[in-house]
Image (cartoon, rainbow, N blue to C red):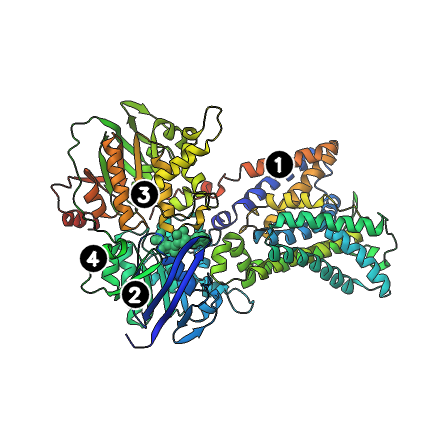
Amino acid sequence: MTSAPAIHLRHISKVFGGVKALQDVDFDVGMGEVHCLAGENGCGKSTLIKIITGVYQPEPGAEIEIFGQRYAQITPTVARKAGIAVIWQDLALFAEMTVAENIAFEAVLGNRPRRVRHAEMRRDATAALDRLGVHLDLDARLGTLPIAERQMVAIARALVGEARLIFMDEPTASLTQTETDALLSVVRTLSAQGVTVVFVSHRLAEVLEIANRVTVLRDGRLVGVYLAEGMTQTRLTELMTGKTFDQHVAAQDTAASEPVLEVQGLTRKGEFRDISFALRRGEVLGLTGLIGAGRTELAHVLFGMTRPDAGTVTLDGRPVRFRSNRDAVAAGIAYVSEDRLALGLIQPQSISDNAVLAVLKKITGGAGLLSDDRQEGLVAHWVRELGVKIGKPGDAMNTLSGGNQQKLVLAKWLATQPKVLILDCPTVGVDVGARAGIFRIVRDLAAQGLGILLISDEVTEVHFNADRILHMAGGRIVGEYDPRQTRVEELEAAVYA
Amino acid sequence: MRNFLRSYPSEAKLLVVLLILCTLLAFLTPDFLTLVNLTSLLNNNSVNVIWAVGLLVVLIAGGIDISFAVAASVVQYICVYVFAAIGGGNWAIGLIVAGGLGMSLGLINAFLIHQFRIISIVVTISTFNAFFGLLMFITSGRFLYNLPSWWSKAVYLWEKETPQGWADIRLPVAVMAVCMVATWFLIRHTTTGRQLYAFGDNPEGARRAGISIGLMQAIAFGWCGMMAGIAGLMQANITKEVVPMALIGRELDVLAAVVLGGARLGGGRGSILGCFLGVALVAVTQNGLNLLGVSPYAFKMVVGAIILLAISTSNLDLARLVTPRRKGRE
Ligand SMILES: Nc1ncnc2c1ncn2[C@@H]1O[C@H](COP(=O)(O)OP(=O)(O)OP(=O)(O)O)[C@@H](O)[C@H]1O
Ligand SMILES: [Mg+2]
């Protein structure tokens, strides 16, 4: 770390309508440093990044210096020329273009219009993917890739070209442990080569592992800047939220209650084989495993989105066969998808409309007309329960911070009051405080007799919050664990082996 | 083959449908598969294809243009006066003037869209009305026949005597080919073209990458306007007269053909091949119905049905049929 700072910001404020996203924030990052930005959902992390990269202009009075140069106004082009690359939280990829074009997008952005050099583009894309140790079909249309692979594409894009400063806004949100490890080692290499990295993540273990220093924001204000060395997760959480949380195994013995969902010999060719388990009333059943283990595919079958090739599903003792997810919803199954930003939300609609979409029936009055009062009541309830940071319920969904959008999709499904709730990675991109909130609600729902299938690749999350854990690998269930009798390290060893 | 199907699913499907249709027609009517019929189809639809490739660029960039056919009429009228003023002119001057005028009209659309942040459909419906109203007001709906002779005379590039009569290929077909190649080069092989795709696909993502939105609108609508102007020039060459309401309504036929060809309303997708096939399918259908003696009033209905069918089967994945199913996720 040399003395000349890579980023030197003073008095950064940003107001959106009535929301003060940032208030008089100072931010310094040293050259070659790995600097983390931490804070709860909606505290202004993404906004700060967007100001430095010229996507938003700060309120007057701001001072911006990058690599020692003062800027009166930054535009995305200026930022790019200054050697800044960004992995956006919402990826900002192009679904209709190929993987190669997305990764080597820099090549498309020549200063003057010129011929596209396809061969060069493929070479750059391959080189970037190699650095991450992943192999993707360069000609595949991006829109056909699963979310984790898209995330890899977004990361690879930032590695093309000679970026001197890379912002990574929750790059690991939809990655599994192995992929995360690969990314973290790339970050270390970059840092060793003198590239400065600003890293945002809600996975605090990761933050403390990779960072030199951490800047903590709370409600748009600077809390402080801390050395990562000597910092603990508990202390960091406290700084971010102003509260303390303790984690302990929440598992309870539910062996006595009767099963609500039973699966027998379920198979879908090429995805998973011979899956059998029972989910009991009031139970939180964890389902963990690496990506490609078939967890999400299994969830899709249970939710009626795809059909099994063999096996039976029994709900409340009656065999069921869903033709579509509408059947599944009607039968009392709710599914919070892994790719929920793409599938679960209708972005430009208002927050309040989005939250009630799945429960329109419940808020319609006698004549079948929507009741505003009931809608408002319901929205207010969930906003409070989950601690969602919103301006007003009528604002468009896409003005919310990434994590707050996640919480609302969750709210949407929780409001349907199903019999079985399938949560596919429910805490991706959600801050510590809200995670605790979500799991409190999950516990409450279980106590009311719901069966909950909790899919997650964060082993600790499953360990602390599930009553029983199934381990899936290669399309099969390969192990069952009781969190009260298994240490988290054993479980991690089994899953990440 | 498999790659083609995967990259161009709707084009491949359209090609199959077109081939089946042509085979059917070849059996049903002896007049269909003749050189005379096919070349006249080509001559008569070249103008539609020129419009289509122009509109394609706008659709790729996530916009829509309703005004281009009327813009072509406006260009025709102005051209008549310009050519008279400069004492005749020739094809080179004609193409430059018509293309330039068309581009200016397109830029008006782009300016309104960008400056006032109004969505393109609203802007182009307004300019459609404004252009047409102005045209009728100034010309009082007069027809013009006094075109310079170079303009109204058919230029034969190739001809051949066949048992059914003379088959020929005329200038508009060559101009169409040039427009197709130029547009293809723009959208597939220049950085600007790829930026247009990116902008149409994810405008916010494009903006964050530093792509200038105003410039994208200007290029898309300017190009569409230029093609419209050239198409107008060629249309008058075919009909040998300039009539103010001759082209009105054509915009929807062209739009339908382009969408049929796989371009997406909403941006980011579409190809030149698709445009050509889309126009071809509509043209061959009409031609076939005509040869089979079906009432012309049924044409529109049948074309409408084809478009509905094409769009509702757009989820059918041909690539699946030739690719072994992907095994799980890697
Ligand atoms: N374009 C916008 N219009 C209105 N409000 C906005 C806009 N962008 C952000 N906000 C608001 O600004 C605040 C900060 O948002 P930001 O996205 O920076 O949060 P964040 O720290 O990145 O959170 P997360 O961890 O959830 O991603 C939020 O309250 C959000 O609702
Ligand atoms: Mg964010």
Q: Residues within 10 Å of mark 2 (few under 14, many from 20)?
A: many
Look at the numbered disc 3 and give the secondary structure of its residue.
helix
Q: Chain of mark 3?
A: A
Q: Residues within 10 Å of mark 3 (few under 14, many from 20)?
A: many
Which residue matches tag 2? A35
Which residue matches tag 3? A386
Q: Is residue A462 left or right of residue A105?
A: left
The answer to whether tags 3 and 2 share a subunit is yes
Task: Give the quadrant of residue A250.
Answer: top left
Q: Residues within 10 Å of mark 1 (few under 14, many from 20)?
A: some
Look at the numbered disc 2 and give the secondary structure of its residue.
strand
Q: Is residue A278 visible?
A: no
A355 or A62: nearer the viewer = A62
B169 or A140: nearer the viewer = A140
Look at the numbered disc 1 and give the secondary structure of its residue.
helix
Task: Give the quadrant of residue B307.
Answer: top right
The answer to whether tags 1 and 4 share a subunit is no
Residue depicted at x 69% and y 48%? B126
Q: Earlier in the sequence, mark 3 or mark 4?
A: 4
> Disc 1 or disc 3, which is closer to the eye?
3
Give how far apart the Cα atoms at labels 3 and 4 are: 22 Å
Amino acid type assigned to the residue bearing label 2 in the image: His
Q: Position of residue A429 (x, y in %)?
A: 32, 50
In the rendered image of this protein, does residue A25 appear above or below residue A394?
below
